[in-house]
Image (tube, rainbow, N blue to C red):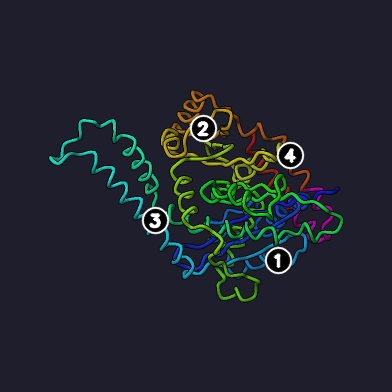
Amino acid sequence: MPTYIEVNGLDESGSVGEPIIFVRIGVSLLNEVQIFLRNIEHFNMLLPDKHRIRQGYEPKSLLRYVKSFVEDPCFDITMFRMFPETQLKLLTEFSLRTAGDLYRSREAIVKLFDSSGNIVEDYESVAPSISQAINILKRFRSPRVLIDSFIKSYGMMVIAMKLGVLSRSSRIEGFTNSFLTVQIAGGYPFAFWWKDLVDKNPLFKKGSFVITGVSNGDEHYPSMSSAGTIAMSLLLNSDKLHLFPIQPLELEGSIDLASFFDGHSRAIEIPTFQKRIIFLGTMNENIRMCIPYLMHLRDRHETYEASSVRIPIEWYFKFRGHGKPENTIVVHSSSLSGQDRNNIKACKKCDYAIHHVSDFKKDFQEFLGKLGSEIDYAPTQKRTSLSASLKKIEEGCLNAMK
């Protein structure tokens, strides 16, 4: 029986306290390449940099990018808006449970001292509770990230719950089975709930559904990148939101908020990743943004999370963890600062695989060739402009890979 394989990218735009726009883009595996063509057409980039676009484009002009997805039947797109009222309800639960955790942490610290204020003699008996209190306090290292991820990961979970209904697999002629890949921008704290959701929800059949949280995913993977760009474009055009089918995102009564809070707290405390790429040195933006996706194309079962490190690598490891050597690769350019060289030496001591950016030249050429073949099917006028833009991107990238 033929299987319909769909890649779903989820991302958001907005700040807690104001309306937050969430966007999901579903695209079949065969049509994923179409996202790159739209990026070239609208932004002259393979994967757009949202911050640069926000500064360089008029908000109204970004709506053309949104419409190109909404009006194309090859994409399945859903948009949601979480209002401050819903966020306030979540924050109330968050505040109450956080206060409870902090008070229990206080109790552990109080037991460390006797009535005279001296450390108790049987320190070892209270050491486990002190260690637990320290782990709880870790989550407040970045309070804005803590609150932001709590609110937004809840929204991501609700959208994922709706995927059983939203997926097109049951509506596509000729397909009787489906396999859905859901990529959520933001990393593990935004998708920590995936296993519990899949296990308990009858809509998700075992072996037909994969959910992955990807740090900086909106920079390196096409569906998440476009979902984030569309969310940002809609947020910048709040006076035009009535023109699009945006659904309200509200609290779901079936979700146990206590369990959600506990899971999120653990996700924040413990750095978690599956595969990781560390970029060192100044690098062509099109190359840097595409390398994780090119690695993903080598093996669709592996989704790499990427970080550009410009600080001493030891500081990065302090917050992100060392992980296993086989799960981390380092990619560097030829343009290296003294700090970059020191970082490479430190990574070699960790037994990470070290690659020069030129090691991906063949992958890049094959990928650009695939884009060129797809452009050949476009109308004449569009084909000419897309080919010219692609050639310029190719020249810039190949020169940077020498």
Q: Residue at x 58, y 34 (%)?
A: 331
Q: Earlier in the sequence, mark 1 or mark 4?
A: 1
Question: Label 3's element?
Answer: helix
Q: Which residue is mark 1?
A: 70
Q: Earlier in the sequence, mark 2 or mark 4?
A: 2
What amino acid does circle 3 point to? Arg
Q: Which residue is mark 3?
A: 97
Q: Which residue is mark 2?
A: 323
Question: Label 4's element?
Answer: helix
Contact (Cβ within 8 Å) of mark 1 with mark 4:
no
What amino acid does circle 4 point to? Gln
Q: Nearer the viewer, mark 3 or mark 2?
A: 3
Q: Nearer the viewer, mark 3 or mark 1?
A: 3
Q: CA distance from mark 3 to mark 4?
A: 52 Å
Q: Which residue is mark 4?
A: 365
Which of these two is toward me, 239 or 258? 258
- 219 shown above or below 333: below
Q: Nearer the viewer, mark 1 or mark 4?
A: 1
Q: Earlier in the sequence, mark 3 or mark 1?
A: 1
Q: Nearer the viewer, mark 2 or mark 1?
A: 2
Q: Where does the image place residue 229, in percent across and percent down from the top left?
A: 60, 59
Contact (Cβ within 8 Å) of mark 2 with mark 4:
no
